[in-house]
Every structure is written in C-alpha cells, then in structure tokens.
Image (cartoon, rainbow, N blue to C red):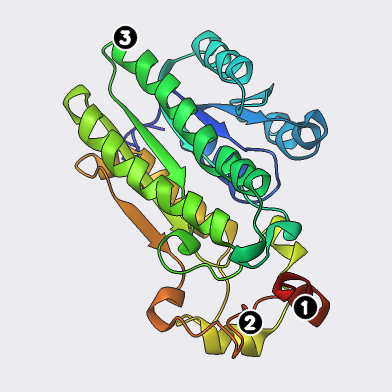
C-alpha cells in the first residue's frame, strides 16, 4: 500500500516455524498483509496445509515450504525458496523452537540428550538460519532485519525448565553479538521475549484461570498471538530502523510482578497437580 511506514513492499521475509497455528502463523499473516512475500517454513506438511494454506487461499503472498531448518539441507531449501520468490530477500523471523511438556523437570534430572535437543530446537536452529540469511544479504549488499523469539524464561529464572530457559537466554546473547557484527552491513538483529501467550502449544500445560492471570500479570491477562506478532513486525520493519541488538519483553507486565511461582517454585500456570508432581519427581 502507498506510504506504508512498515516499508516491507517488494521484500521477501522468511518465517521459520510458521505453521503451528500460534505466533508463527500470525507473524506470517501480518507480515504478508504488510506487503512482503512470506516464505512460511515448517517441518510438517499437514501443519502447512492446516494453517498456511488458508493464508494463500485469501490471496496473501505466502509461499509454504516444508523443510526442517535444524538441518543443513533444510536451511539450504529455505534459502533457495526465498531467492526464487518475487522480491528481494530482506528479513527472517525465527519462531521455530519451543519445548514439549515432558521437558519440564528438575535440573538434577536433565540428561545430555534433553539438553542438546532443546538447544538444537531453540538456539542452533535460529543461529544457523540467521547465519545463512545474513550471508545471503551480505553477498548481495542488501540491508535486512532478523528477529528471533526468546522467552520470559530467558530473561529471568526458569525453575524446572533450565535447558529451555538457558537456550532462550542464549538467544539474547546471540542477538547482541550478531547485531554488532552485522551493523556495518545494515543488517539489524533483534529479539522478542514473550510472556505467557494463548497459543495452541501453550494449551499443553496452561489452563484457563482468569483469577490467577489477574494476580500474576500486571495487565491481568495472557497475551494474544497478534500482540507478540505486532512487536515482531515492528522490529522487522523500517519503523525500527535505528534499533539493533535489543530484546523486547512482551509480557503484559508479568516480569514486573514475577509472582507466578507457587510455594514450591513450580509455576502457577501449570494446569494440574499430576503435571506438577511429574516435574518435581527427583
């Protein structure tokens, strides 16, 4: 659209982890609505069919790509799709990651496999895809913007979720260092750290409890995917052209209160006692 201050028209943006039906899918939609061609990447074709195909059906410039970006082949396939798309490669949003419910456990119980898996999902994937996009931008002398998802767990403590929290904290460090290295090339690197957000993935361990949300979160409610996506869109766009190396906490003020730990240091957001008992087990 003429005069769009976001400045994304004619640009190609890769969204890794675009087909979960939550933050990634919302980012893909909002970035496409802002005028960019979106390379929507997911490991699962079914997820692409369920969550990304409806965006293309609406006429949005979204290109679904089935690829595992935790592998070199998946990264290469993603870059190839981005270069073949209409427009110039400009941006990357690293949403791929997360943690399954069974990864919650005491620090004394975390295995090397648990640790490595969570670091692969939440740090390695983001770094090597960022590396590939940055290298392509540099080779073409093009400026760009990279935004990764950290977490409130990476900005504070993460009891019973140490591997995930540490990997998300490492996203913050990765963001700051890459921002310094790439600033001279006019490639900005930032991150967003969501608080508790109402997504399909969060339903695995967070139930509906309005009173608890009012007590734990300054704004009294959990975030919506579009609220996290809005912050990402800002950092991706020309509206933030003088911002780099930052991690924006988008949590409704949860970090300001930080009262969501129960007396045993387990999260009040865990939806049932059986789950709480399982993660406390020695």
State the residue position of label 2.
268
Which tag, 2 or 1, sits closer to the chain's start? 2
Q: Position of residue 260 (x, y in %)?
A: 54, 82
Q: Residue at x 16, y 25 (%)?
A: 184
Which tag, 3 or 2, sits closer to the chain's start? 3
Q: Residue at x 49, y 85 (%)?
A: 259
Closer to the camera: disc 3 or disc 1?
A: 1
Q: Position of residue 167 (x, y in %)?
A: 49, 49
CA gap, disc 2 and disc 1: 13 Å
Who is closer to the viewer here, 236 or 43?
43
Task: Say left or right for 54 vs 173.
Answer: right
Q: Quadrant of the N terminus?
A: top left
Residue 139: which disc?
3
* Secondary structure found at label 1: helix
State the residue position of label 1.
277
Q: Residue at x 63, y 38 (%)?
A: 18
Closer to the camera: disc 2 or disc 1?
A: 1
Task: Say left or right for 251 vs 214.
Answer: left
Closer to the camera: disc 3 or disc 2?
A: 2
Q: Quadrant of residue 208 in the image?
A: bottom right
* Secondary structure found at label 3: helix
Which tag, 3 or 1, sits closer to the chain's start? 3
Q: Residue at x 79, y 79 (%)?
A: 272
Pointers 3 and 2 in contact (C-beta within 8 Å): no
Q: Quadrant of residue 185 in the image?
A: top left
């Amino acid at each position: 659209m003429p005069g769009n201050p976001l400045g994304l028209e004619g640009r190609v943006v890769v969204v890794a982890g675009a087909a979960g039906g939550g933050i990634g899918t919302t980012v893909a939609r909002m970035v496409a609505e802002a005028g960019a061609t979106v390379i929507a990447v997911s490991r699962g074709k079914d997820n692409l069919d369920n969550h990304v195909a409806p965006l293309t059906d609406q006429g949005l410039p979204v290109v679904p790509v089935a690829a595992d970006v935790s592998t070199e082949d998946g990264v290469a396939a993603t870059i190839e799709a981005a270069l073949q798309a209409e427009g110039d490669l400009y941006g990357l949003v690293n949403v791929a990651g997360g943690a399954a419910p069974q990864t919650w456990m005491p620090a004394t119980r975390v295995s090397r496999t648990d640790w490595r898996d969570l670091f692969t999902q939440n740090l390695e994937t983001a770094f090597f895809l960022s590396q590939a996009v940055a290298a392509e931008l540099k080779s073409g002398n093009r400026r760009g913007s990279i935004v990764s998802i950290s977490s409130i767990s990476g900005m504070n403590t993460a009891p019973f979720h140490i591997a995930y929290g540490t990997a998300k904290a490492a996203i913050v460090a990765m963001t700051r260092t890459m921002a310094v290295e790439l600033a001279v090339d006019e490639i900005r690197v930032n991150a967003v750290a969501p608080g508790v957000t109402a997504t399909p993935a969060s339903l695995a361990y967070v139930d509906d409890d309005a009173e608890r949300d009012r007590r734990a979160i300054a704004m009294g409610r959990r975030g919506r995917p579009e609220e996290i996506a809005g912050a990402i869109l800002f950092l991706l766009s020309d509206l933030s052209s003088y911002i780099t190396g930052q991690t924006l906490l988008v949590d409704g003020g949860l970090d300001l209160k930080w009262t969501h730990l129960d007396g045993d240091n387990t999260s009040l957001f865990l939806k049932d006692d059986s789950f709480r008992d399982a993660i406390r087990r020695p």
